[in-house]
Image (cartoon, grey):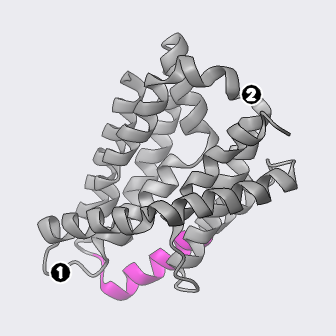
Amino acid sequence: MLGTVVNAGAIILGGSIGLVLKKGLPKRFGNQVMNGLALCVLYIGISGTLQAKNVLMLILSMVIGTLIGELLDLDERVTQLGNWLENKFKSKDEYVSISEGFVSASLLFCVGAMAIVGALQDGLKGDTSMLYTKAMLDGISALIFSTSLGVGVILSSVLVLIYQGGITFLASLMAPFLTDMVIAEMTGVGSLLIIGLALNMLRMTNLKLMNFVPAIFIPILLSLIM
């Protein structure tokens, strides 16, 4: 799990630097930076959806995964965790919800092919090269995002540890099912969530994105029957 630990550390480091830079940033500038970042996130999401080739699998994954997410009410559970963290860490001059930053950054850092493939390579071969590359990218992203989303970005490193660490730990069991095709479809579904994240950041929607997260893993099951 060395690659995942380094990845989480890079998020903490980058986010911490961003918080230092944020102190001199007026609120109106912070809001505009967030809008600009949201547009970048929207581009990332749209680019990722193009990797999906099986539209039917994507639709079924979203429907089935959302039903599971609603049944478990994952959004409420993660929001409660974010609110607890907010009560513990929020300062008086914080103008962005820690819960929002935590959920948004967690989705951004956990959804994507590099998180899945990198964690698998680490678990199966001890190859951390992809996760080291992801760590560098996530560290830079954390620096930029924490200037507008605050300390919640740093706290998202906990979910990165759990998510990628879990894949690494279970790599030998998951690898036979995660073909290139399945990973592409998982990336496509996950990228739809990234688009939803961008719309939420722009205050255009208020989607309960965590309730969609199970959809990312449904292509694994559908690939066995389709």
Frontmost residue, 219 versus 101: 219
Residue 80 vertical placement versus 52 (above, below): below
Frontmost residue, 47 versus 147: 47
Frontmost residue, 102 versus 226: 226
Give the foreground label among 1 and 2.
2
The magenta span reads 25-39
* Tag of residue 93: 1
Main SS of residues in magenta: helix
Left or right, 184 with respect to 163, comes to: right
Q: Position of residue 92 (x, y in %)?
A: 13, 81
Along the polypeptide, which appears first: circle 1 or circle 2? Answer: 1
Q: Secondary structure at mark 1?
A: loop
Residue 94 vertical placement versus 183 (above, below): below
Residue 100 vertical placement versus 52 (above, below): below
Task: Say few, some or many: other residues with alpha carbon within 10 Å of mark 2 (under 14 / 14 to 19 / 20 or more).
Answer: few
Q: Position of residue 38 (x, y in %)?
A: 55, 72
Q: Position of residue 5 (x, y in %)?
A: 34, 31
Identity of the residue furthest to the top in this view: 125
Frontmost residue, 72 versus 44: 72
Q: Position of residue 200 (x, y in %)?
A: 53, 77
Instruction: Report if residue 119 lies within the magenta region.
Output: no
Q: Which residue is mark 2?
A: 179
Residue at point 31%, 46% (across, down): 158
* Tag of residue 120: none
Q: Is residue 187 visible?
A: yes
Residue at point 57%, 83% (across, down): 205
Residue at point 59%, 77% (across, down): 199
